Image (tube, rainbow, N blue to C red):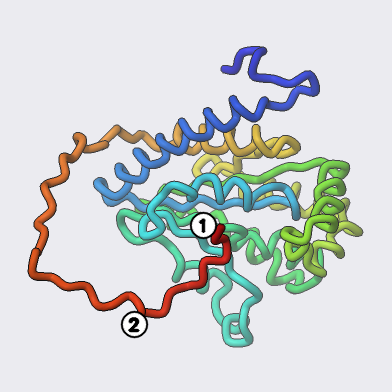
Amino acid sequence: MTDSEHWKDDGSLKKTFYEQELERLQVELIKLQEWVKAKKLKVVIIFEGRDAAGKGGVIKRITEKLNPRIARVVALGTPTEKEKTQWYFQRYVSQLPSAGEIVLFDRSWYNRAGVERVMGFCTDEEYWEFLRSCPNFERMLIRSGIILLKYWFSVSEEEQEQRFQARLQDPTKRWKLSDMDLKSREKWVEYSKAKDEMLAYTDTKLSTWYVVDADSKKKARLNTIQHILSMIDYKDLTPEPIELPQRNHNKGYVRPPMQEQTFVKDYYAE
């Protein structure tokens, strides 16, 4: 799809091409958004993967230009004591989309098959019950009319380590390194086994897992957006250009004195 002029010598995408292509795809996402709204579709997109695999960056680029009233991100924290007593899927069900909505799960009910399994936050019985019931749960969602897309972001051990080190050096990203992230570095093999087992049970013909090669952040972002657009048959509902009417100036209006209002200080005055 891309010409050789779009690549650097190291195989990465050139910044100018990446930005142009991202902008083009974001315009298409707006068209998709308007189609979802007009046709009252219900879309769920799940983003899973290892820590620092780039899930957040993809979600940010997807939602950057979209209407937050239509495209909503769900990133649930640790379950409360009350939620721990509920049916496992219950708190996720309450976040599912209404007609005309797109919901993006930054981690999802698959926490049970990943971090909870590896870190021992659930029992063996709870874990196996999840693997048995998850395909049925997703079958119900799809039968109800929900469009369900699931993406697993795959990153190499070497690339993950580089991103962890970069976060340590960048004060704007250091908050992304939680204690759980640091513990996950010690359990690379355990997470790999958990992922393999999860896919074996929940990668079905009806509810497929799509694996994203995420070692290149730029390519992962473009590939994921391209794939999402290819999975939903949408049409361009962009309205005709709007001609703004003339302003109706009220000549009788008198603005209150500016000194009576409290303005933010101009910190960058010449």
**Residue at the extreme top:** 4
In percent of the image, x 73 and y 73: which residue is there?
A: 122
> Seen in the image, is 237 located left or right of residue 144?
left
The answer to which quarter of the image holds residue 2 is top right
Which image quadrant: the N terminus? top right
Q: Position of residue 244 (x, y in %)?
A: 16, 45
In the image, residue 120 sits, relative to residue 132, either above or below, namely below
At which x and y percent is residue 16?
A: 60, 27
Out of 117 and 245, give the one closest to the viewer. Answer: 245
Q: CA distance from mark 2 to mark 1?
A: 63 Å
**Which residue is denoted by mark 2 in the rendering?**
260
Amino acid, disc 1: Asn
Q: Residue lying farthest bottom? A: 82
Name the residue: 57% across, 61% down: 268
Q: Amino acid at mark 2?
A: Glu
Give the percent coordinates (x, y) of residue 130: 63, 64
In the image, is 84 to the left or to the right of 261? right
* Mark seen at residue 136: 1
